[in-house]
Amino acid sequence: MNIAVVGLQWGDEGKGKVIDYFAKDVDVVVRFQGGNNAGHTVVIGEKKFVFHLIPSGILRNNKISVIGNGVVIDPKVLLEEITFLKKQGIYISPRNLKVSLLAHVIMPYHKLMDSFREEERLARIGTTKRGIGPCYADKISRCGIRMVDLINPRVFSLKLKDNLREKNLLFRNVYGRKGISFKKIFTEYSYYAKLLKPYCCDILDFFYKNRRLNFLFEGAQGTFLDIDWGTYPFVTSSNTVSLNAVLGSGFSGIKIDRVVGVAKAYTTRVGEGPFPTEIKGKRGGYFRSRGKEFGATTKRPRRCGWLDLVLLREAVKINGITEVVITKLDILDELKKIKVCVGYRNSKVKPYIFSHLKKISPVYKTVKGWCSSIANIRSYNKLPREAKKYILFIEESIKRRVSHISVGQLRDAIISK
């Protein structure tokens, strides 16, 4: 049984916990896109683990975690993550962590480009300034540096010199900034290469030899941050949808049996861009405070709003979703009335063309809340009647089964339906 787990909104849906949950039933967990602009959180007892590059499945014993070729890697961040997890007693070695030789490397000039471009824009995107976009841009421009290049000193030296000739011209002549030193970067990144080389492998060979194992493909961000299907240009720089699971991992020919979509019981997004159901003021503050809605990567406060079923219906179609996990249902505990977006007044509007419109007017349906704590409930039958009605309403609207419901941060705070 092979599974893909993807977000159905603008990211931050709680995929880390869901991936950790499903990882217990597979052998290999593969991250297939994005970079350290993503943050997946898993809470076990008193310990909180935030992942940016390593798949969340690393917390499960006897599982192999793979960083695929579709991921862009900041070597410093990856090494910091490895070091942190080892200090927490998590076993990590080249036996259970594999890094694709074809994954591209985020360089210091990518981070500078990210920052400079954002500063010069007339309409800012809200980038994390981690160098993700410029790294993907170099990949497409055929001047990127891959892990296989990084661990080969001669190739790395040649590619770095070539790139710095162009980047330093841009920094000086376009942005009016100082150039950056070859020697400093080469020395620092050669050190990273030495430490990461044991983890690097030919992922295609690895997959082929282990093709009879069970795989979980881990998506980062969410459907509407996808470079093609998101609310462009307020998106990330990779394909976040399930269609990229095979390409971003390099596992050709694999059959994905289940595509699990993760959605919050309400909606959030970080950064700029359209957000039809956004709530401002006191009510928005309620969600932000009670739901601890601050970015796992940037700590930026998330924008909050009501659940948007138009978004979910589109995300289900785009990803070929077979089942849905609803997270943070417990955050709605104190609400007497809950609003849900069931449509837009302009019924022809599609989420992926939001950016062309000045205003999107949602049509709401109000449902009754349950006004009681569900954080300690672990059986669907024990949920309040109104909470079950809310889940049923979602299922009927998106025409997919809700298989699990998360009711808290803790690892075991999940209900199988």
Image (cartoon, rainbow, N blue to C red):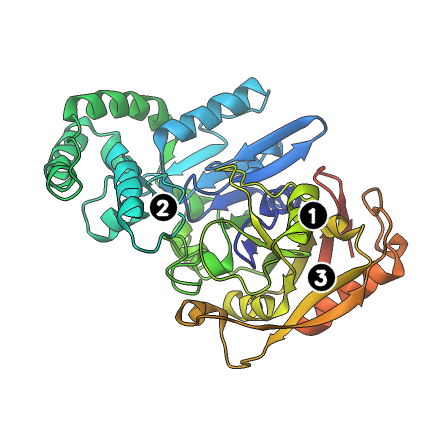
Horizontal side, residue 97 vs residue 309: left or right: left
- Quadrant holding the C terminus: bottom right
Q: Amino acid at mark 3?
A: Val
At which x and y percent is residue 84? Answer: 51, 22
Image vertical order of residue 44 relative to residue 123, above or below: above
The quadrant in which residue 258 appears is bottom right
Q: CA gap, disc 1 to disc 2?
A: 40 Å
Q: Amino acid at mark 2?
A: Asn
At which x and y percent is residue 239? Answer: 41, 57
At horizontal 49% and vertical 70% (from top left) the residue drawn is 359
Q: CA gap, disc 1 to disc 3?
A: 25 Å
Residue with the most extreme front position: 281
Secondary structure of the residue carrying tag 1 is helix
The quadrant in which residue 309 appears is bottom right
**Labels 1 & 2 near each other (Cβ < 8 A):** no
Q: CA gap, disc 3 to disc 2?
A: 31 Å
The quadrant in which residue 305 appears is bottom right
Along the line of sight, the residue nearer the viewer: 357 or 92: 357
Secondary structure of the residue carrying tag 2 is loop
Determine which residue is flagged by label 3.
402
Along the line of sight, the residue nearer the viewer: 283 or 67: 283
At which x and y percent is residue 93? Answer: 47, 25
Q: Amino acid at mark 1?
A: Tyr
Mark 3 surroundings: few (<14), some (14-19) or many (≥20) residues within 10 A: many
At horizontal 48% and vertical 43% (from top left) the residue drawn is 38
Determine which residue is flagged by label 2.
69
Determine which residue is flagged by label 1.
286
